[in-house]
Image (cartoon, grey):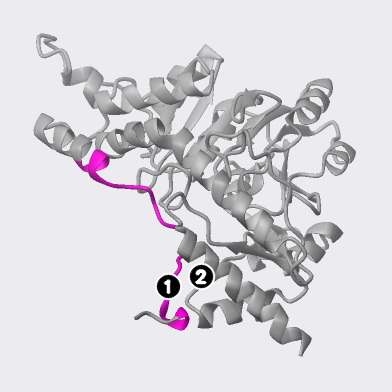
Amino acid sequence: MQSAHDRRVPLFRPDLGADELDVLRDVFASGWVGLGPKTAEFELALAAYQQRHHGVATNSATAALHLALKVLDLPPGSRVLVPTITFVSTPHAVEYNQLELEFVDVNETDLCIDVADFESRIDDRARAVIPVHMGGQPCAMDAICRIAAQHGVTVIEDVANAQGGQWQGRPLGSWGEIGVFSFEAKKNMTTGDGGMLVFDDARWNDALRRLRWCGIDRDTWKRFANRGESASWYYEVDSLGFKYNMNDIAAAIGLCQLRKLDAVNAKKRERIARYLDALEGVGDLVLPPHDLAHGGYWLFIVHTDHRDALIDHLAQRGVTCGVHFMPAHLHPYYRKRHPGVCLPVAERVWKRIVSLPLFASLTDEEQDHVVESICNFFAEAKR
């Protein structure tokens, strides 16, 4: 019989199975596995789900963030405001575009961008803001969009952590001028890796498609789908683009995952409800706020002054935890690029945060083992 110490509970487990294998067989049988009809279908499906007019699929959310700023064609010296607690892809996108990066502090409870700090940092060079729905916690998008509109600041929503979530009845990703999604291996829906931009402005549609395909004016599928076209081989390059396209293998998985998304998120909210009930009042844990009706949560993050010791204790019992994230401005690269940045809330709170296992297939037994291990840690700490 397996002992408690022999159990293994991962931090994440993707929800992949027979359905994804079936759609992959169809793609393989079609003979077209690159950028093609499945990618186009996935773009239309996700855009419709997000209540947007257009979707452009990429090979990662990092690429999508890069292109989101690129397509704005901001003048040199433009400032882009980014919360410091996020994966480094968010500030990296600003650096890729050679724009001026301004880090913003976060709220202590939900780790999302502090709206007051954001507003205080807007000046006449501020041109864009990238709020991050951290771990699936929704940012206060009504306030952010109102402030941004008053100052002519474009809003790019980073929805990498929050697929399927809502704010005030609207999908996350539908508030800003552009929404950016991640389908990396651990996210609410996955294609192994991948990303997408969703938006309404038709002027960006063709430009983004060229940018994600090396600046080529007609991608391979467009040139060869119509076999009767005599000049199907011909294309032109009119801009310096990037090799950022999604392929039909990933897109087919994405279509399957999108059909499951609401069910996956509902299961994760059930797991969160169990955590909230079981961990209330345990040790010094501070539990996060959650919308158990509409949330699209990637992470379940708790706060404790005993973070590192708790992580070690859980690891000894086969429970994997994570820290999401060290503030980006504290990484060596950004310390050199932006010396003297002081964001007191982020610098204090990140030392207390720990992400517990959360995924749709997390069983009662696995979750009970996580909870019992946490309770055991705090019980031992009292002795």
- What residue range appears in magenta? 4-21
Percent coordinates x, y for residue 192 in the rendering: 35, 48
Q: Nearer the viewer, residue 104 or 368?
A: 368
Residue extending furthest toward the bottom: 383
User: Residue at the spot x=78%, y=34% of the render?
Assistant: 126
Asked if the residue at tag 2 contacts the one at tag 1, i.e. Cβ–Cβ closer than 8 Å, the answer is: yes
Residue type (three-letter) at the residue carrying disc 2: Thr
Q: Which residue is most to the front?
A: 1
**On residue 195, which mark appears?**
none
- Residue 328 can be seen, yes or no: yes
Q: Which residue lies under the disc numbered 1?
A: 8
Asked if the magenta segment contains residue 8, the reply would be yes
Q: Secondary structure at mark 2?
A: loop
Is 73 magenta? The answer is no
* Viewport quadrant of the N terminus: bottom left
Q: Is residue 356 above or below residue 47?
A: below
Three-letter code for the amino acid on which mark 1 is drawn: Arg
Q: Secondary structure at mark 1?
A: loop
10 Å neighbourhood of mark 2: few (<14), some, or many (≥20)? some
Image check: 99 left or right of 104? left
- Residue 230 lies left or right of residue 35; in this view the side is left
Magenta-drawn stretch, dominant element (helix, strand or loop): loop
Indicate the position of residue 321 as horizontal and vertical percent values.
56, 68
- Residue drawn at point x = 62 percent, y = 33 percent: 294
> Quadrant of residue 344 in the image?
bottom right
